[in-house]
Structure formats: structure tokens, C-alpha cells
Amino acid sequence: MPPRTARYKRGVELMEEIHGPGAAEGIQGIFKDICPDFGRFVVETGFADVYGRGGLSHAQRQLLNVALLTALGGSEPLLASHMKGALHVGVTPREIVEAVFHVAIYAGHPRTVAGFSVAKEVFAELGIDPLADDDTEQPAG
């Protein structure tokens, strides 16, 4: 069981603000059989220390995570988790779509295709129509 320091408690608080109730317990459960210290590291370092900084809102940080994880590739379960977290803190489906689309010009089409595949799964799971709030103007072709 991780120590219940103020730093850990702050990390739990932030993690649950972003990912919902039980998120910290879930991350602890993933690593309890192999490296419990890594679960605590994620809560304390990732959330208390990084998400706890000023300068960016939770929504901005989540949108950055969506773009970065899409660009990196190979982290699709984590990408799905951060897409859900982004929606939880007020990022719109359209903003997620635009963040993934933006990756195409910097990291390439294959990464964007994979990101859209994850987004489609997340939106379908949550019953979200990503085109419902599409008020963007398309460039003349």
C-alpha cells in the first residue's frame, strides 16, 4: 500500500478530477503485481508534481497528451484513457479530432490514422457523435 503523504493525496485528488473516481486506485491495481512503486510514481510525479503545476488547465494538459500520445504511437490504451480524461474535463470531441488531425503535419499520416482509430473506439464506447458539434469551415477545394 503506498504511503499516504500529502503529495500522494494531492496526486490522487488531481487524478480523480481528470479521470474520475477510482482512477488512482485503478493505476495502483495495474502495477501492484509487478511494481507498486510505479503506480505511486504516476500518482505523485505525474499528477501531484506535473498536473499540479500552474500555467495550463487540465483541459489543455489533456489535449497535449492526446496530441503527444498520437504522435508517439504505440500507446493506444493510454491514448484512449487520456481521450476519456480530456472529455471528462471539458474538451469537446471536435477538439480531440482537431488535435489528432494536427498530428498529421508533424508526425505523419500513419500516426494520425491510429489516433483516429482510438478516437472512434472511445467515442463509440461513450455514445458520442464527433461530428455533432462540427461547425468548422472546410477550406475551398
Image: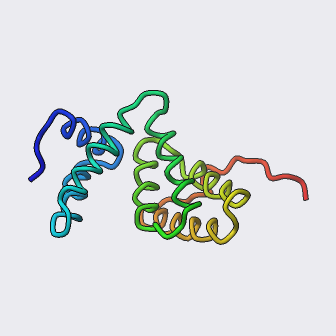
Above or below for 124 versus 37: below
Q: Position of residue 23 (x, y in %)?
A: 26, 52
Quadrant of the rendered structure where residue 80 is?
bottom left
Residue at the outermost top position: 54
Above or below for 71 versus 117: above
Residue at the outermost right position: 141
At 40% from the left edge and 50% from the top edge, which residue is drawn?
A: 85
Instruction: Between residue 121 and residue 31, name the one nearer to us.
Output: 31
Q: Position of residue 120 (x, y in %)?
A: 53, 67
Above or below for 118 versus 50: below
Quadrant of the rendered structure where residue 46 is?
top left
Q: Position of residue 13 (x, y in %)?
A: 25, 38
Q: Position of residue 45 (x, y in %)?
A: 31, 43
Quadrant of the rendered structure where residue 54 is?
top left
Quadrant assignment for the C terminus: bottom right
At 65% from the left edge and 72% from the top edge, which residue is drawn?
A: 110
Report the number of discs. 0
At 33% from the left edge and 37% from the top edge, which residue is drawn?
A: 49
